[in-house]
Image: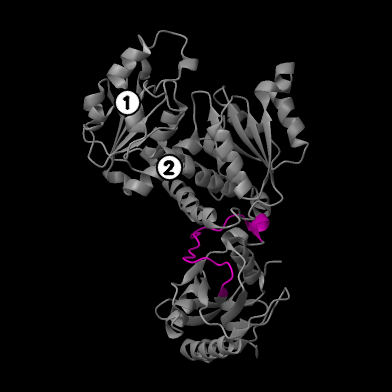
Amino acid sequence: MTTANDLQLNDRGQLRHFLSVEGLPQALLESIMDTAESFASVTEQTVKKVPLLRGKTIVNLFFETSTRTRTTFELAAKRLSADVLNVNIATSATTKGESLLDTIRNIEAMHVDMFVVRHAQSGAPHFIAHHVAPHISVINAGDGRHAHPTQAMLDVFTIRKHKGDFTQLKVAIVGDILHSRVARSEIHALRILGTREIRVVGPRTLLPAGIESLGVKAYYDLDSGLEGVDVIIMLRLQRERMNGAFIPSEHEYYARFGLTGKRLAQAKEDAIVMHPGPINRGVEIDSKVADGSRSVILQQVTHGIAIRMAVMSMAMRHDSGEKMA
Amino acid sequence: MSDSPSLSRLPDTQSLLDTLEQHLRQEIASRQLTDPVMIGIHSGGVWVAEQLHQRLNISKPLGKLDITFYRDDFSQVGMHPQVQASQLPFTLEGRDILLIDDVFYTGRTIRAALNEIFDYGRPAQVLLGVLIERDGRQIPLRPDCVGGTLTLSAGRRIKLTGPNPLALSVHEVRQEPA
């Protein structure tokens, strides 16, 4: 069995695919953020694009619906001058019985260079990366409960811009950790970057058993979980993934774990509030907090474009990379 | 080899800067540029531009251009590490631009720089000044003002180190990119 890193790094330690943050070296995460930083000036240009990926074709392969992630990937690809093809598989050939591999082979035959994959099944992007032609790169845009590496990177990028040194920071991730691929990827990224303390906060039913093995502290009470933290990452209650009785009611969830102004006062005075979106106002977060001065939720969206530009340009195959591989 | 100067025979950067400054002044005067802006190409060009910016009393702050995203060798070598964001603290539309680099060689860097500049706006004119021009042009571009010229064999490269002090050195390169 090959590990994710055998797949996602070439023999010089450069990105080949971007499937998971787990196990990547700190220097590579920093290099992704530095590259994203350098793309910031592109939005100041009259022509808001750079010719880096001109002539390359990127396919957004979304087996699961998404608006924010797909549009920011699309915009990132377009700002790099790539041609973008959006394939919404939920309404496509797989519903007519075509296998995943057949779908991939068919799109491969259209001479494309990169797949951006979202799939409800954990591991689907790894499977695709394993089977695609050698010149194609695969970027994971969220797979099942497993990983959402570009979201984690844009989150740590946002934190770095506001707070700088991770070794001084206490970060609380609040809510539905159990169903959250975002939380998993964030925990890995924060750990790799040397974050002083990572907390996960939520009801017992929504914190996976043994979560402490990831190097985090579990809190079942919001007030104590937020005490003295620098960063609060709220997660969306993923009602669509909940088949069992995880919470008594949304009303009760909000009463115990909703982030209100009063709750926010437990954190440090300059703590920032983040949320990967989409927000359920009045379920996990009060509108006043979501729209308040401490919220950096919309900055996360903007940073998502720069991070995706960085990851796509770093992972895109190039000739010498092929020779070395 | 007769065309390969030893370190001691390399021109002094201060006298190159003096000559470049002089040529730029002449060119600014003959083109009647009243309030040009200056842009240095990262990283050697920025060092040279910092000196000239001061010497020529340019009113607007110095612009810095990183041409990484406009290079023509991405499909061969991929992303260059250590990219910096370009900083152009003025609008380029309708402006007279003094574009500054350290070494003019193949012309590809300037091609990339011009493409990037035009993505920021349409300047009135662009004037190119370089500290040193060596032989080996690969595209039909030339600097307007130079501090000095040099002939080197194909396997050699001239490099500016800096910013304090600015110094030129010549290196052997094993392999010339196509």
* Dot 2: element: helix
Query: Which color mode does the image show?
Result: one colour
> Which residue is more in the foreground, A6 or B86?
B86
Can residue A7 be spotted in the picture? no
Chain at numbered mark 1 = A
> Which residue position is annotated with label 2?
A299
Task: Where is residue A252? Give x, y as percent.
Answer: 31, 13
Between A218 and B56, the one nearer to me in the picture: B56
Residue sitting at 65 percent across and 31 percent down?
A: A61
Residue B175 lies, in percent from the top left, at 66, 69
- Note whether B6 is above or below A190 in the view shown: below
Residue visible at 49% across and 67% down in the picture: B90
Of labels 2 and 1, earlier in sequence is 1
Q: Residues within 10 Å of mark 2 (few under 14, many from 20)?
A: few
Q: Which mark, by number, is residue A319?
A: none
Residue A172 vs residue A256, the one in the foreground = A256
Secondary structure beneath dot 1 equals helix
Callouts 2 and 1 on one subunit: yes
Residue at label 1? A212
